[in-house]
Amino acid sequence: MDQNSTEMPGQTVPVWTVFIIFLRLGLTSFGGPVAHLGYFRAEFVTRRGWLSERSYADLVALCQFLPGPASSQVGMALGMSRAGFPGAVAAWAGFTLPSAVLLAILGIGLSGWGGIVPAGLLHGLKIAAVAVVAQAVWGMARTLCSGALRIGIMLSSACLVLLWPTAPVQVSVIAMAAVFGVILFKPLQDRAHDPLPVTIRRSTGALLLLIFFVLLCGLPMLSEVWPNHALALTNAFFRAGALVFGGGHVVLPLLQAAVVPSGWVANDVFLAGYGAAQAVPGPLFTFAAFLGASMSAAPAGWPGACLCLIAIFVPSFLLVFGVLPFWEQLRRSRHMQAALSGINASVVGLLLAAFYSPVWTGAIFRPADFGLALLALIALKFWKLPPWLVVLSSAVAGWLLGGVF
C-alpha cells in the first residue's frame, strides 16, 4: 500500500482495509464532529499521507458547506478516494456501527425494560443533554453569529420555531435565512486552493443530486398517499438528514418535531437517549438508531434502528458525491457563500429553540437539576472533561439525587 500517495489511481487500498481503519476510529473518536475532523487529519494527512493539508481543508470546507454530518461525510469521501464507492460505504460502516449498535441496544432496553431502569438515572441523562446543547449553542453562536445581522437572523429563527414548532416551519425558516443571506451579506472571494483528490463524473453527480431531490420532494407526498409507518419513518429521517446544517446537534429539533408529537417516541425517552448519545464515540447522527429501536410501533427494535439509521445517512451519500464534481465552481460563488452565512445563523437559532424546548423544559424542574446541569456545563467547557465521562457522571448523580428528593 502506497501510504504517501495523494492521488486516486483506482482502488489503491483494499475495501476491507478501509473498513478496519475507520472501525478503529469509530471505536475511539469521542468529542463530537470537530474532534472527529482532528482525528481524521492526524490519521490520513499526517500519518498515512492520503492527501495534502490543503486538500484536506478543502474537503472539510465542502462537507461543512453541505447539510448533514460533516465528519461522516469527510470519512465517506476519504474512503471513496482510496477504494471507490465500496470504500465510501466501508468507511461509513466502520465509523458508524460502534455507536449505532450501542445506542440501538440502549433503545431496545428502554422500550422493553424501561420500568426497571431507575427514573433518576434517565433524568440524569436528560440533564447531561442540557449541558451538551448549551455548550453547542454557545460555541456555534460565537463562530457563526458574529455581528448584529447574524444575531438578528438567529433570534428571529428561534422565535418563529418556538411559536410554531413544526417541521415545515423549521424548513421554511432555513429557506428564508438563505434568501436573507444572499440579500444582506457580501462575502469575500475565496482564496486559492488545491483541487479535491476525489474525481466523479459530472453526469454521475447530476444523477445523484436528482435522486436526492426526488426523494426529498417525493417521500412526503408518497407517505400522504400511502399511509405506512415504515414509509413515514423513512420520510422523517431522510428529511432530517437532508436539512441539518451546522453539525450533529442541530438534528435534535428536527427529530424531536418528527418523533415526539406523533407519539412514536416519548419525550422522556427521547431526551434520555440524546444524553446517552454523548457518551459514545462516533457521529451523533447514530442517535437515529436509538430512536428507531425505541419506536412505539413496528418497525421497532433492530429493524427500526436499521431503517432510521440508513434513512438519515442516505442524503449525505447523495449530496457529497453529487456535489463533488461541481464543487470547484460552487465554492467560488459569492451568492452561495452568502446564502450559507444566513443558513448557519438560522440553524443556531433552531438549536437555541430546541435548547429551551424540549431540552430545558424536559429536564430542569428543581434547583438541584439546575445545579447539576451547571456543573456538567462547567466540566465540559472549562475543565475539558471528555463528554462520555460527564454524561455517565450526570446519570449517576441523577440517580443519587432521585433518592434524596
Image: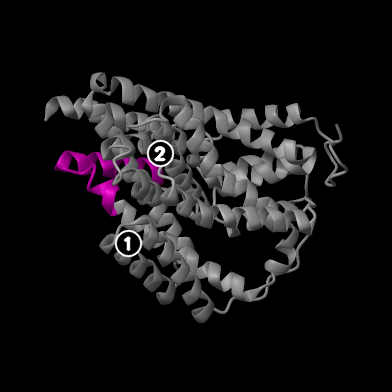
Quarter holding residue 339: bottom right
Dot 1 or dot 2: first in sequence order is 1
Mark 2 crowd level (few <14, some 14–19, many ≥20, 10 Å Cα):
some
Q: Can residue 272 be seen in this view?
A: yes
In whole angstroms, how far apart are the C-alphas of marks 1 and 2? 26 Å
Q: Which residue lies furthest to the left in this view?
A: 405
Q: In which quarter of the image is the N terminus?
A: top right
Mark 1 vs mark 2: give the one in front: 2
**Is residue 372 one of those drawn in magenta?**
yes
Give the residue type at disc 2. Answer: His
Q: Residue 295 carries which label?
A: none
Q: Is residue 278 visible?
A: no
Give the residue type at disc 1. Answer: Val
Residue designated by label 1: 161
Residue designated by label 2: 229
Identified at 31% across, 66% down, the residue is 160
The stretch of residues the image draws in magenta is: 356-383
Secondary element under disc 2, as helix, strand or loop, is helix
Secondary element under disc 1, as helix, strand or loop, is helix
Quarter holding residue 328: bottom right
User: Does the CB distance between marks 1 and 2 fall below 8 Å?
Assistant: no
In this view, 369 is above or below 179: above
The residue nearer to you, when weighing 351 against 135, is: 351
> Residue 130, how many percent across, how many down?
31, 45
Identified at 80% across, 55% down, the residue is 201
